[in-house]
Amino acid sequence: MPRLTGIFEHFADIETISANDIAQWIRTPSQTTSVEDSLGNRILYPQTIAFKVEDLEMDFAILRELIGRHPEAFFNPLTKKIIIGEEYVTRFPPLTRLVTTLVEMLNPQGVIQAIVKSPSKMIQVATVIAPYQKAAVVNTGVLQTNINVMVNNKNMVLASGTITILPFKERHLKVKIGAENEILVAGGSLGLVLDLRSR
Amino acid sequence: MAWCWTCVAGNMDTQIILKANRRVRVIPNALTLVKRKLMGAGKILVSKNEEVKPQDIVGRSTPNAGFTSINIAKKLGVDPVEGGGYLKREIGKNIYEGELLALKTGFLGKQVITSPTDAVLEYYDRSTGELRMKLLSKEVPLPAGVNGIIEEVDSKNGEVFIKTLTTQIYGILGSGRERSGILDVLNGSAGLLNETKITSSLSGHVIVAGSIIYGDALRKAISLKLAGIIAGGMHFSEYKAIVGNLNQKQKQNIDIGISVVASEGFGPIPIGKDIFSILEKHEGSFVFIDGDNAMVSLPTATPGNILALRKTAIPVNTKPGGEIAGVSIKDITTGLAVRIIWPPFMGSVGKIISIDRVPTLLETGISTILVTIETAQQKLKVPYTNIEIVE
């Protein structure tokens, strides 16, 4: 008989995720048995939504583990696109946190489009830029803590080791990060996501 | 596979149709085929179409009782070779509990060994001093347990199938083969069971434990040979240790020596009032528990129903205990009986009294339609996605 399901039901190995794996992503984790029971109920009742903030923390922790185990469900390395199903946007607000989580866990490199996919359309919400070479954004022999970023001739200084979202909606953006060459990318409802973590 | 939408914030004049899973939890007075099975070799005493009452004996069996041993030489402080000489009953003879088994007299007085149980003296080992005793089998009567009509007799397998009426309760998860026993309600629906309440007097019984079956309580119940435990929840790790996989198709139906049924989910969750009130009413009754199908059957047939039972045919291919109640999708409307399936208030049962027309932004940032549910104690507002319809 058909029944309502939920996002996590796509992942057959969800019950193999350990409580420790989930707890590492939660700021104030509960006891191991509570984390395990929450995961079990999430599997039993996949259609339910997080009512309290701690529920959402738990859901994000599970999502992180699933992204790590099934990157192919979210990222196509050939087309360099992160595809976010519309149901994820409603289940894991805000969009900034969802995209940041995906970038953190997928760790893509280069220029990647982040797209929200609904049954009828695909909308680009952001361009993710993750420079390939750490050396390109540092001075010779010295690790820089701040990185110069120029977007459409607007200069800003960002901390290295971070993922930063810059709200640029324009379709044509000229971006130059540190000593890297200038590139032309599109913005989106979210804008530019700059992944300046060390590699 | 239908998706559950969290928010449809359209035109306020547009009627939004919201859906929820409908799960059958209680089927009252269902026509049921109950199986009664002999323990060990024995004889069926009834025949097809015979009427039976709960106390009627439908069969008798003498199950293999097993063996025990006593080290006679050690107890008497003698050499193993000599120990057999102090036996007061010959090998191959019966002996009964409390009777003189061995006697040694000496300067320091008498040393006496009595038989700990009813048994046959089987063999004395002169190298170890062990006396092996085969326990005497006792005839065990098999009561019908229900008012009903004998539908089928399988003498070869020692089984009797009785047509009767039962109220069937379906939980969310469980483990263990079909068992039966007297129902004891040890706790309130939200209570935590102290394992000291599990005593040997509950051997063969089915208990209602409250909000959770703890591992320690479960192990004690197994050792004291209880038939079953019903609770609101159990820990995920303990359940997985028993069944291996949550997926119903991949679940290993391993019997751990007891049948367990959890009515709500994982962790401590009060048993829903829709189920608990029925269990309370049947306290002291003979009930059937099927852990593998998460089902409890509570006989409801009375001698007055027998005529109606006789006129009603069991459908072909009906399995004992009935089919597993499934889950379907239903439109959410006011007046429906529902249960809350996510914290807070998980396990609460009530009726929908209103459905919001516009979505609410939760503290999580998720925007969704809330429904108002009236329980026996209070009114609760929860996301429509976090309920299941139970009628």
Image: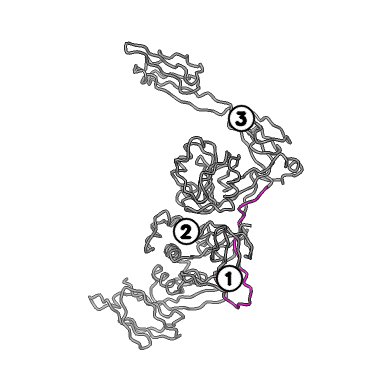
Element carrying mark 2: helix
The residue that label 2 is drawn on is A14
Mark 1: amino acid:
Asp
Q: Quadrant of the C terminus of chain A?
A: bottom left
Callouts 1 and 2 close, C-beta under 8 Å:
no
Q: CA distance from mark 1 to mark 3?
A: 59 Å
Question: Which circle, 3 or 2, is nearer the viewer?
Answer: 3
A67 left or right of B78 in image? right
Residue A41 shows in this picture: yes
Does the magenta stretch mainly form a helix, a strand or a loop? loop
The residue that label 3 is drawn on is B141
Residue A67 shows in this picture: no
Chain for numbered disc 1: B
* Number of callouts: 3
Whole-percent x, y for residue A131 in the image = 35, 76
Whole-percent x, y for residue B220 in the image = 45, 40
Mark 3 neighbour class, 10 Å CA radius: few under 14, some 14 to 19, many 20 or more: some
Whether callout 3 and callout 2 share a subunit is answered: no
Chain for numbered disc 3: B
Q: Nearer the viewer, residue B175 or B183?
A: B183
Q: CA distance from mark 3 to mark 2?
A: 48 Å
The residue that label 1 is drawn on is B356
Q: Is residue B13 magenta?
A: yes
A55 left or right of B182 in image? left
Q: Which residues are magenta?
A: B7-29
Mark 2: amino acid:
Ile
